[in-house]
Amino acid sequence: MAMFRGLSLLIVVTIVLNNGCMSNAPNKDKQLSCEDSVIFRFDGEEIYLLKDEFNLKVQANNCDLIILNEEKLASIRIGKLPVISFCINNKKYRAKGNKILNSSVPKDCDSFFPINDDGTISFFKRNVISFIMIKQ
């Protein structure tokens, strides 16, 4: 009987913890529209910025991503060699980092942003990533 109670308690605790811990994770089954998120992909990790966690300021040949979520900004600052996906006017863009002194453009992307020698993002301001758009 004691074993049954212990097992029942373990099941209840597991269910409660899983529901609470996953409340901040994006629901991958739910399809976000193109304009609703920005995705940072690092080696083995993804960070999602949802619509209320960023602003995009678009100009003719460049675009600034302003990150509003301080907790996610801290994680993004330490990530190395990210690939960033975002949308402008329902067109998907894929951005890769490019060392500041490189004269070439990264392959397989629509835009690029500056990175430091260690592969981390070089921020234009405290929380702004500036993308250079590649004309197709």
Image (cartoon, rainbow, N blue to C red):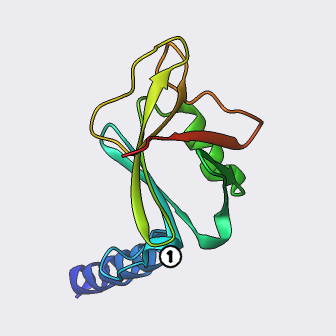
Image spot of residue 119 (x, y percent)? 46, 22
Question: Residue, x 70% and y 43% (percent of image)?
Answer: 128
122 w.r.t. 73: above or below: above
Question: Residue, x 63% and y 41% (percent of image)?
Answer: 129
In the image as oriented, which residue stretches furthest toward the right? 126
Viewer-nearest residue: 7 or 45: 45
Q: Is residue 26 left or right of residue 67?
A: left
Quarter placement of the N terminus: bottom left
Q: Is residue 22 left or right of residue 76?
A: left
Image spot of residue 4 (x, y percent)? 22, 86
Residue 105's quadrant in the figure?
top left
27 w.r.t. 108: above or below: below
Density class for disc 1 (Cα within 10 Å; few <14, some 14-19, many ≥20) is: few
Q: Is residue 59 left or right of residue 104?
A: right
Secondary element at image label 1: loop
Question: Residue, x 77% and y 37% (percent of image)?
Answer: 126
Image spot of residue 125 (x, y percent)? 77, 35
Viewer-nearest residue: 22 or 28: 28
Image spot of residue 50 (x, y percent)? 56, 68
Q: Which residue is mark 1?
A: 23
Viewer-nearest residue: 105 or 46: 105
- The amino acid type found where label 1 is placed reads Ser
Residue 27's quadrant in the figure?
bottom left
56 w.r.t. 80: above or below: below
